[in-house]
Amino acid sequence: MRETLSDQQLHLFCLRWAAWHRAHGLIAPPMQKGILARLQPGKIRNAPVVVLSSEMSLFNMAVNAQPDNDTRKTFLIYYLFPARSVKELADACQLSDDAIYKRLRTFRKRAYRAAVRLDEVNRTARLQRPENEPLGLYARAF
């Protein structure tokens, strides 16, 4: 992952993440409600084409690791459950349009910095581990 992105690049990155996130929700079919319905053979459908991306996965982990506050909720509503307009979102949050944009910029930057740090930690851990050493106790259990 690149160390820094401009605000516009970060917005485009978040839009890519949102599309990636929505596509990953379609990997498994929804569970049937009743137990008898689960026992019936289901329709066979084609699996969706989903791009596996370590970059998007790290960003998703960073977003989910952020505190569950109004800023995070605003980010998720804006990108994952798009409102018809920012004015509608601002009215729902009882904020001005500028406050919504400021929240989004702040959260995007914070989450992206956390993803970059996660990437650095992963890269450092990979470099320090010898090739023949097992991944650890938890990896052996699976």
Image (tube, helix red, strand yellow):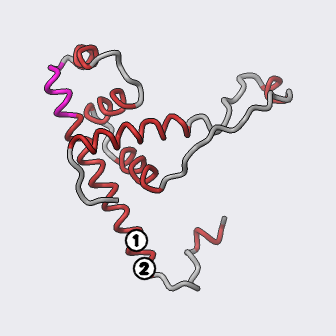
Question: x and y percent of residue 58 in the render?
Answer: 42, 54
Horizontal placement of 85 versus 44: left or right?
Answer: left
Query: Circle 1 sits in a helix, a strand or a loop, which is it?
Result: helix
Which is more toward the observer, 38 or 106? 106
Compared to 37, does 20 lie above or below? Answer: below
Q: Amino acid at mark 1?
A: Arg
Q: Per the image, is 99 magenta? A: yes
Horizontal placement of 16 versus 41: left or right?
Answer: left
Compared to 12, does 84 lie above or below? Answer: above
Q: Amino acid at mark 2?
A: Leu
Q: Name the quadrant containing residue 98.
A: top left
What residue sits 43% from the left and 49% below the top?
Answer: 56
Quadrant that contains the N terminus? bottom left
Residue with the most extreme right position = 40
What residue sits 17% from the left and 21% below the top?
Answer: 97
Which is more toward the observer, 32 or 79? 79
Instruction: Give neighbour class at mark 2: few <14, some 14-19, many 20+ (Cα, 10 Å).
Output: few
* Magenta extent: 95-103
Quadrant that contains the C terminus? bottom right
Instruction: Give neighbour class at mark 1: few <14, some 14-19, many 20+ (Cα, 10 Å).
Output: few
Horizontal placement of 95 versus 52: left or right?
Answer: left
User: Where is mark 2, residue-wise?
Assistant: 127
Question: x and y percent of residue 101 in the render?
Answer: 19, 30
User: Where is mark 1, residue-wise?
Assistant: 123
What residue sits 58% from the left and 68% below the top?
Answer: 138
Task: Tell whether label 1 touches label 2 (CB within 8 Å).
Answer: yes
Disc number placed over residue 91 in the picture, else none: none
Whole-angstrom CA distance, mark 2 to mark 1, is 6 Å
What residue sits 41% from the left and 25% below the top?
Answer: 81
